[in-house]
Image: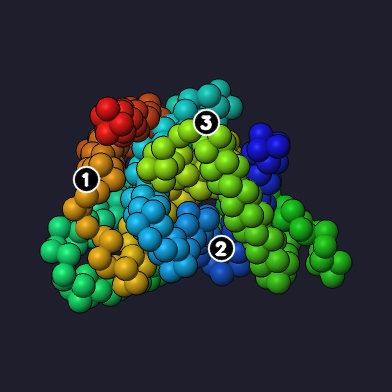
Amino acid sequence: MDIVLLLVSFGVILAGSELFTNGIEWFGHKLELAEGAIGSVLAAVGTALPETMIPLIAILFGGGIAASQVGVGAILGAPFMLATLAMFVTGAAVLLLRKRRDAGASLAVNTGVLGHDIAYFGLAYAIAIGAAFLPGSYEAPRRLIAVLLLGLYAWYVIGHLRAEAAEEANLAPLRFHRLDRRAPAHPVAPRLRIVTLQVLFALACIIGGAWGFVGAVEHLSAALGVNGTLLALVVAPIATELPEKMNSVIWVRQGKDTLALGNITGAMVFQSVIPTSIGLIFAPAIWSVSGAGVAFASAGITFASSAAIVIPMVIRRRLEARWLLIGGVFYLIYLTIVVSTLIGTRG
């Protein structure tokens, strides 16, 4: 039964992601937003909702040490998965589809947009991780840091929204276009209400599918005897990051590389601020490296993977798919650390 739920949930996520990428492009077009704002803000925030709900529920409605561990693991796991596995999947998709793409194995991205995102991510995440080194009794300073992070994210969003919109891209017909009997046929733009309806429906599919996927993974993990810490740090984030991965693969297939990578880097900025701020405001005592060294070690891997991908891009002013594959290497390194630690603990 869990296998069936796993497959059905994955299908729902995939369908929702396809509807979402199609709808969010039209939504951004209707609002005359730049490509960076569509990928790094609208798409990133929308697809980051499933993994954001896990720490929110664990911290606000959970109880005890176990719930706190799940919350911290989910907060740290999201940016880690984006900087490693999501980058790897995107790079692999480009290489597999290179013969169908005009850019081949290279990514036709706006390096300025991606560099802008990673710079904000690096600053925000460094501040958030720095707060974990404060003494446990320093709850007020932690909450002030959360306010600082939220202000930083607001400035980041404003910067993207102020960017000038690029020339109209080749947009596929809105999937819900036929539901609007008053709308003219494609390529005339559909009405905003129909575009919004499709985006909201897609988000419902993504969130519902992600929750079903996580539930199935949890049941399978329990049946197989997988450690709860491993689930919180590694297994659950894989499931909840599926929307970003699927969206990026869809956009890569369509040759919209800035949207594909912006969806990931924008989600990294979001995840470095919003979930961490939730923890710092509502449960500041749990955001501490004390007793959670393995969990916070993922932050170091996240920084290393991001730097290994972005620095060559900035120097050469281009991005090759093979550079993204290094994210998979860093993912395996951390997985080895986690498994080794768990084995040592059991021993």
- Which of discs 1 and 2 lies nearer the camera? The answer is 1
Give coordinates of residue 61: x percent, y percent: 47, 67
Q: Nearer the viewer, residue 112 or 269?
A: 269
The residue identified by callout 3 is 224
Proximity of marks 1 and 2: CB atoms separated by less than 8 Å: no
**In this view, 146 is above or below 225:** below
Q: Amino acid at mark 3?
A: Leu
Q: Is residue 128 visible?
A: yes
**Quarter of the image where one finds residue 331:** top left
Marks 1/2: CA distance? Answer: 41 Å
Give coordinates of residue 25: x percent, y percent: 59, 56
* Disc on res. 155: none
Please tell me which residue is depicted at 66% across the width and 38% down the height of the picture.
Answer: 2
Proximity of marks 3 and 2: CB atoms separated by less than 8 Å: no
Disc 1 crowd, CA 10 A, few/some/many (<14, 14-19, 20+): few
Marks 3/2: CA distance? Answer: 44 Å
Give coordinates of residue 131: x percent, y percent: 19, 62
Mark 2 residue element: helix
Q: Nearer the viewer, residue 44 or 27?
A: 44
Q: Is residue 126 visible?
A: no
**Quarter of the image where one finds residue 174:** bottom right
The residue identified by callout 1 is 293
Left or right: residue 287 versus residue 154 is left
In the displayed orientation, state which residue is furthest to the front.
Answer: 347
**Quarter of the image where one finds residue 11:** top right
The residue identified by callout 2 is 28
The quarter of the picture where the C terminus appears is top left
Please tell me which residue is depicted at 83% across the width and 59% down the height of the picture.
Answer: 178
